[in-house]
Each structure stands twice: as C-alpha cells, then as structure tokens.
C-alpha cells in the first residue's frame, strides 16, 4: 500500500502505474506481480473513489507505511518549525 499512497501523493489521484513508475519499482527490487498488484489496487481505489485523500493525509499514510517522511511532509514540517529526524 505504501507505493499506492506514494503515487497518489506525488502524482495526484488520477495517477496510474505507467512505464516510468513500473521501471522505478522494478529498480527497487519489486517483482512484476507486485507491481501488477499495485496497479490493480490503485485502479480499484480510483474506481471506488477512495483515492481522493487530502495531500496531508496521503503524506501521513506514506510515512506510516515506509517509516520515512515524504519530501512534501518534511517541507511542511520544517516550514512550521519542526525538525524531523
């Protein structure tokens, strides 16, 4: 789910697993069946209109799934005076 949320966060709710996304995931060591599952889940979420999370919520979900702050979330936190690890 982390990759699904990351795609939604960085590319918006109309995103899809295109050749570039698939190549990046493969370079990170993901198998083709895992990439297909991400594409399926993203498509399913879009059709059921649950891919419409607010940007801030998506950043939180990415952070929860990956254990890292997204660039967007890190920037917002720094702008508010927080110092993320």
Image (cartoon, rainbow, N blue to C red):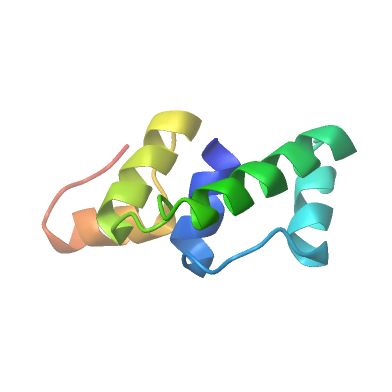
**Residue at the (32%, 60%) spot, across then down:** 55
What residue appears at the point 37 percent right and 58 percent down from the top-left corner?
52
- Asked if residue 28 shows in the view, the reply is no
Q: Is residue 46 above or below residue 5?
A: below
Frontmost residue, 56 versus 79: 56
Look at the picture and state if 59 lies above or below 61: below
Left or right: where 82 falls relative to 47: left
Quadrant of the rendering where the N terminus is positioned: top right
Residue at screen point 59% across, 43% down: 3
Task: Single out the residue that lies furthest toward the front.
Answer: 48
Picture coordinates of residue 23, whole percent (x, y): 83, 55
Q: How many labels does the image show?
A: 0
Q: Is residue 38 left or right of residue 57?
A: right
Where residue 37 sits, quadrant-wise, is: top right
Could you say where residue 31 lies in the image, as x and y percent from the top left? 86, 34
Quadrant of the snapshot with the C terminus: top left
Return the x and y of residue 54 as percentages of the image width and height: 28, 58
The percent position of residue 28, horizontal first and vertical second, equals 77, 41
Left or right: 52 with respect to 16?
Answer: left
- Judge whether residue 50 can be spotted in this image: yes
> Is 43 on the left-hand or right-hand side of 56?
right
Residue 5's place in the image compared with 8, above or below, is above
Question: Which residue is at the far right?
Answer: 32
Near-viewer residue (38 or 2): 38
> Which residue appears at 58% of the width and 47% of the height?
44
């Amino acid at each position: 789910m982390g990759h699904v949320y990351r795609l939604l966060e960085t590319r918006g709710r109309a995103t899809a697993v295109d050749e570039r996304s698939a190549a990046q995931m493969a370079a990170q060591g993901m198998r083709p069946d895992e990439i297909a599952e991400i594409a399926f889940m993203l498509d399913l979420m879009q059709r059921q209109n649950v891919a419409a999370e607010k940007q801030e919520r998506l950043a939180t979900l990415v952070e929860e799934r990956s254990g890292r702050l997204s660039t967007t979330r890190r920037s917002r936190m720094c702008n508010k005076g927080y110092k993320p690890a």
